[in-house]
Amino acid sequence: MSKLGVAVIGVGFWGKNHVRVFNELAETELIAVCDVSKERAISIGEKYGVEAYSDSKELLKRKDIEAVSICTWTTTHSVEAMRALKAGKHTFVEKPLASTIKEAKRIVDFAKREGKHLAVGFIERFNPGVQRTKEILAKGEIGELVSATAKRVSQWPERIGDVGIVKDYAIHEIDIMRNIFEDDPIAVYAKVGNLKHVKYEDYAQMMLTFQQGKTAFIEANWLTPYKVRKLSLTGSDAIVELDYLSQEITIETSKRMTKPRYEWKEPLKLELQNFAEKMIRDEEPEVTGIDGLKALIIAEAAIKSSEKDHSIRLNLDRLS
């Protein structure tokens, strides 16, 4: 099998993990790295024995790079993604796809016109715990899905400086709810605000309404002194709870509680491996640009809902 030539643009807090994984995967050949910090780019490049750049325009001139992973600050996603697509590269963009809906639409439309694949980094889609939870749901083990609740809380991560809690944390759960319900929400009602951070909101609670009255509840904040990442699904016959971090699942019915045992696997490695395999086969990525756009539309609607103090209707079918 031929390897996919890849590069990573932005090798800071999270990007350096992309570099590590691409270097480890059998499906990829890490060609180069890029970062606005020349010193950081050189340091990472030397560690993995690849070329280092401080200007992505120069990196993108290389013909041996077939795909790039963009892990820069959200406010630069649009510029970097458009550069990569114009250079003819398949493009993986860490969530959120862009800082605004307008930018995200531009990226999605351009990728479609150019015939290049665009993937968005929603890592929890590849969390084995999430995938097993979906299998449990599909098998009917909890009956009919009624509602879902997600909690993603911790202290403020210093890596964040250009988006608030909704577009950085809650957007993960927005995507997971779309994936779990296999549908788009028709309305969102939210309360967001800031207690400790002046520039951006640092807490959010939102409710997504789906067809047939089904609902999803999301809590996210940068205030809780310890990290919690949990998902709970309430069915007509049972409740299943997942800890994203440990990937442990608990299934509870009226008669018994079970905790299946599984091997822990790294979600990022599974995510990037899936991306590489799809690109090698020239197939649409698992999480598309449309998925990224829809999640961003819902996120911005949540912020608007809080500002207006009423629910916001959604019409996402037109984007499918």
Image (cartoon, helix red, strand yellow):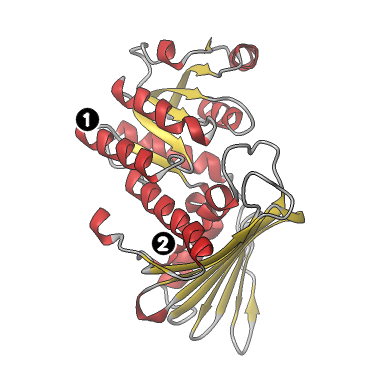
> Is residue 60 at all visible to an observer of this figure?
yes
The residue labelled by disc 2 is 178
Query: Under tag 1, what secondary structure?
Result: helix
Q: Quadrant of residue 274?
A: top left
Q: Which mark is residue 40?
A: none
Residue 39 percent across, percent down from the top left: 65, 12
Q: Residues within 10 Å of mark 1 (few under 14, many from 20)?
A: few
Give the farthest residue toward the bottom: 254
Left or right? Give the position of 209 relative to 266: left
- The amino acid pointed to by label 1 is Glu
Residue 168 percent across, percent down from the top left: 56, 47
Rendered view: 86 above or below 142:
above
Query: Under tag 2, what secondary structure?
Result: helix
Q: How many marks?
A: 2
Kindly report the distance in space between the C-alpha atoms of the residues bearing marks 2 and 1: 27 Å
> Is residue 131 at all visible to an observer of this figure?
no
- The amino acid pointed to by label 2 is Arg
* Point 29% across, 23% down: residue: 86
Residue 93 percent across, percent down from the top left: 44, 36
Rendered view: 72 above or below 315:
above
Give the mark nearer the N terminus: 2 vs 1.
Answer: 1
* Point 34% across, 43% down: residue: 289
Q: Residues within 10 Å of mark 2 (few under 14, many from 20)?
A: some
Q: Quadrant of residue 280?
A: top left
* Point 36% across, 11% down: residue: 61
The residue labelled by disc 1 is 114
